[in-house]
Image (cartoon, rainbow, N blue to C red):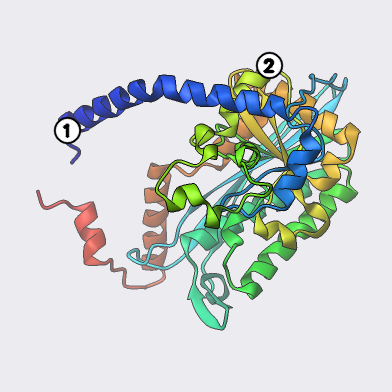
Amino acid sequence: MLNLAEVQRQLLRMVEEQAVRRPDFGQKVGIAVQEVKRWFSGWHHLQSKIAGSKTSWLVAKFDETPARVYPLPPRPDRWLVFASDGSQIFPDRHEAMLCFLINIGSVVLPYGVDARPHLGNRPHLFYRESDLYQRWGGRRVLVSEEIVSVRRHLMEVEELARLARSWKFRPAIALLDGTLILWTLEGKPADFRSMMLRRLLRMLDTLRALKVPLAGYISSPGSTDVINALRVGLCPYQFANCDKCEWIAEGKHPPCAVIEGVADIHLFERLLKPGERSPVFWSSSQILADYGDHQIGFFYIHAGLEIARVEIPKWVAQDQTMLDLVHAIVYDQAQKGRGYPIALAEAHEQAVVRGAERELFYEMLEAALIRQGFKVSMTFKLMAKRTPAV
């Protein structure tokens, strides 16, 4: 049971500490704005410095001044928006039978097109030995929550490709909630990583062939890639080498610490007006070395009520028509959704598995087992959760 009085006391202390730090944080954001403007014309020098530096954080790459602002382009008269989202019931070894479920929600919203909207979802149950156990890195591995999440992500992209094949009208864009970069694959066994990436890249090939730009929409992003690029610029040496920083070795704050703690969204809140976007930046994530022609770029957009990060494949970033289409439609979707793309909001509603549905799922599983003559049992831990002693 939650001690609400104690929680309230800690919440008040947290807010008081944040209030004390607020002026200092505002000053840091101001310095970041000054820095990005300082490199407006000399961005090539910053680009070269980043290329020769060794940092302990992800640093954005760029092909133009990072301070450039792009106005909202006109949207087309007619278009389609595809969106997908997913939810899951993770495998639980305390339940009657080991299995997991992935529910994929999909939405098609036509604008100016003589067609009805599509809203639907498809549950997928995984229970076979090949679903639950895989041999990766020379080991037989039981599926984990992390692996289920990766599979759900791939199924979301596969659903977008399926929609793009079924609906022929163009222009159209495909929206995904979240990142296009499979960060969780970094450090995983090579065979597992290769298998997952092959599935993803095959779907990206399909979307490119169908001329449907893909965009991953990240609400309230906490990334600092662009800020980290500015931190490199603040280093007084020709090239930064964080592992050999003399200030840190002496227990002092390095020169780049004047903007430490600032996120990219804080910077672009000061630079962008509603509808405007930043330049396209490029992620330096190691996993992207395996993405081939589908390198992932990103830009920040003022969606009206928030700064969002929008991730796109290289083939979208390098096609001005596709890039403008993503820019215009993402903003339009956010306006229709009162701050968040309406197609993604609807896809989430189609996909989400709520707590009561999860309980009903396991009740249905137990009933099905009993009908087939199985003896149903549960662990003592699960029994204790379902029937509290006090």
Image point (49%, 21%), residue name: 26
Is 102 rendered above or below residue 310?
below
- Residue 39 lies, in percent from the top left, at 73, 30
Query: What separation in Å lies between label 1 and label 2 (alpha carbons)?
Result: 41 Å
**Residue at image mark 2:** 274
Residue flagged by tag 1: what amino acid is it?
Glu
- Give residue 76's quadrant in the image: top right
**Residue at image mark 1:** 6
* Residue 250 badge: none
Q: Which numbered disc, 1 or 2, marks the residue that appears first in the sequence?
A: 1
Query: In front: 11, or 103?
Result: 11
- Give residue 183's quadrant in the image: bottom right
- Residue 138 lies, in percent from the top left, at 56, 83
Query: In front: 371, or 378?
Result: 378
For mark 1, does the 10 Å Cα neighbourhood hold few (<14), some (14 to 19), or many (20 or more) residues? few
Element under disc 1: helix
The answer to whether 358 appears left or right of 130 in the picture is left
Residue flagged by tag 2: what amino acid is it?
Pro
Is 330 rendered above or below residue 186?
above
- Residue 175 lies, in percent from the top left, at 71, 38
Element under disc 2: loop
Is 194 rendered above or below residue 26?
below
